[in-house]
Image (spheres, rainbow, N blue to C red):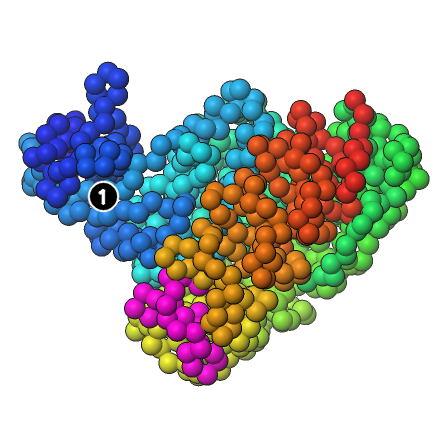
Amino acid sequence: MYPSITDYISSLEGAADTLATLNYLRPVRKPNGHPFFSSGNFAVVFKMEDTRTGNHMALKCFLRDVPDRARRLRLIGEWIADNPSPYLLPMTYHPDELWVDCAHCTRQEFDVVMMPWVEGQTLGEYVRDCCTRADRSALGFLAFRFVLLAEWMLNQNMAHGDLKPDNIMVRADGHLALVDYDGFYVPAFAGEEATETGTPPYRHTRRQLSDFNLYLDDFSLLLLQLELQTLACFPDWPSVYSPTDALLACPDDINAPRQSKLFADIYDKGKPIHRTLLAELEGALKKPLIFTIRDLAKPQVQKTIQYNEPPDLIPYRKGNKWGFCDRNKKIVIDCVYDLDWFFQEGRASVKKDGKWGCLNAQGVTVIPFEYDDVKLFSEGGLARVRKDDKWGFVDRYGVVVIPLEYEDVEPFDKGLSIAKKNEKWGFINRHGTLVIPFQYEQVWLFSEGLVNVQENGKWGCVDTNGKIVIKPQYEYISFFKNGLAIAKRNNSWEFIDKNGTVVTSLEDERDRFSEDRISDKMASLKRDDKYGFIDEFGEVVIPFVYDGAKKFSEGLAGVKINGKSGFINKAGVVIIPFQYDYTQPFSEGLAAVQKDNKFGFIDKQGTVVIPFDYRLAYPFSQGLSGLARVEKDGKWGLIDKTGRTIVPFEYDSQYFDKSQFSEDKASIVKNGKWGYVDINGEVIIPCKYERVFRFEKGLSYVENNSMGFFIDVSGTEYFEE
């Protein structure tokens, strides 16, 4: 039995005597004299003052027993200490620290956890306040900061495990921090089960205790981003949907997304970014837990086209109706539509009177306004359409090529579309002919000529003709890369080839076949608590002697020994000595490394090229003219490979990477307003908009006063009230 909250309050009244090593802490009191605390199902957290420094600390006391809690919290604290970040709080575990006079307890000394107290509001509290005052600008800025948090989390070898609004704090300066680490996953827990499965609606519907890995937060991040982006446009929606502990969604929305009124309204009333996020969310729900953002976010290989001028037909808003104009703002297609977007293959999807159709460049209706949904054209010039909850395909002239008889369809890729019929998945070709029968519970896209299929709860692989190549027998199979995939069978992980032959077994669940673990046909693995490298045949090519290892990049891999990191080559020779606290992979000949809590850049000989002047640094991004995003004194800027400042350190946040620096332009924010700079650091559009989106085809969608419109690179605004 554990003490009650009242028992803990009584004990901490005499903290100088009841705390063993932390007896310098004193309770912080509210104006009414009561101690300041917050509580949940498993613990109560007291706000304490460190009498030596005056700093406020959080003291966590437990209300219920959790198996193996002491070991887990110690390991979590060690991981955080080894991987410091502004998003995390250092924590220490103190066994038998607090003496409590508890009549119903079998002992009197209890463990506690201490960490810094975060001044601010929970994400949920902050969002509610912003919605109450309809502060769209603050909500938009919060959504942007959340994207930065998500970007950071997806690049770590950890997971929070219970990501929800109450476990994210918004500091007084607007920066975010994660709290409540009881469900944390760190590499030391590989192969173990979780102690909790997260909180609805922010947990994946298929999540079980056995799902304890790097992917726990992916679904939560996706849903939270969708909610935040939506609220930035519709701050009154919480009063409509009345969520309890969530920002907008409820468990019913996640369990039955196609019946969700919230999701329907997001699709009908939202912006393109909302529909994109919603599509990704629905896609993630169809897939196993292990496949979510990390797979959705993988870039597609395609030629990058730089647009210097806007298209001939530009979406134009007149009042609350949309049409199209030319570059001189002369209206070409009347503004009579509820929603429209860019032309693609000479067609534009538009909405009128609640139904979707398509126009050609002359404004003639080529696909009638009779569909509940019309998706963009994909391979073969076919567009997905939905009517009465059934999907099919039409051509550019509105002719139904594949009947609307499917519960779901995906775009065509390599001549095939994933389709669902009678609750089973299969593949059809562009003529509607069944290629792979409707017999699978789940299917995935082809990788190296094979597609993963699930039958009777087990995964296997079939070829493009539907022939079973690997019998369904696995709990999980990844995509194939270089002829190999990672598979899980009977709770054991292994590499398999395209015939299903086991190449090697894996000790560490973290050794999954992914972009983070393999390159140039070499993968870093863990055996007997040490890391090394194997080749595509499972042969050891670099011995297992390291405490940590990353993938090879530009011929070098970051490895760690005794808490310090350096780089080795493919022969295992140490090229750059073990002297850094943290390393990033080489990119464009340079690597960002951390030393004494500061980042700088080194070359492949280990020479410091750019001094250790930055609190945070991101790699030089290929295709971005040799620029890196860095933070200094709380402001963001861009530097080149000599360390010269290209974009000055005067912006609140920047997201300069390949996913956001589009058409040689990047969004910037200053004093809560958004604008754009080019790759030379020149401000091409001043910071004057509440929200902005990426440039695409020479245009960007922006918002002011909660109304959206398009601008071009010269700053011309295409709208009139």
Residue 566 lies in the magenta stretch: yes
Residue 76 lies in the magenta stretch: no
Q: Residue at x 52, y 40 (%)?
A: 145
Q: Position of residue 129 (x, y in %)?
A: 47, 23
Q: Residue at x 57, y 41 (%)?
A: 651
Find residue 654 and report its image quarter.
top right
Q: Position of residue 326 (x, y in %)?
A: 89, 38
Q: Taking the image as drawn, is residue 489 in sight? A: no
Q: Position of residue 674 (x, y in %)?
A: 63, 36
Viewer-side residue, 514 vs 552: 552
Q: What main secondary structure does the magenta stretch of the protein show?
A: strand
Viewer-side residue, 19 vs 495: 19
Find residue 83 and report its image quarter.
bottom left
Q: Is residue 343 above or below residue 169?
A: below
Viewer-side residue, 396 vs 560: 560
Viewer-side residue, 450 vs 64: 64
Residue hosting label 1: 113
Region rendered in magenta: 558-583
Q: Residue at x 51, y 79 (%)?
A: 536
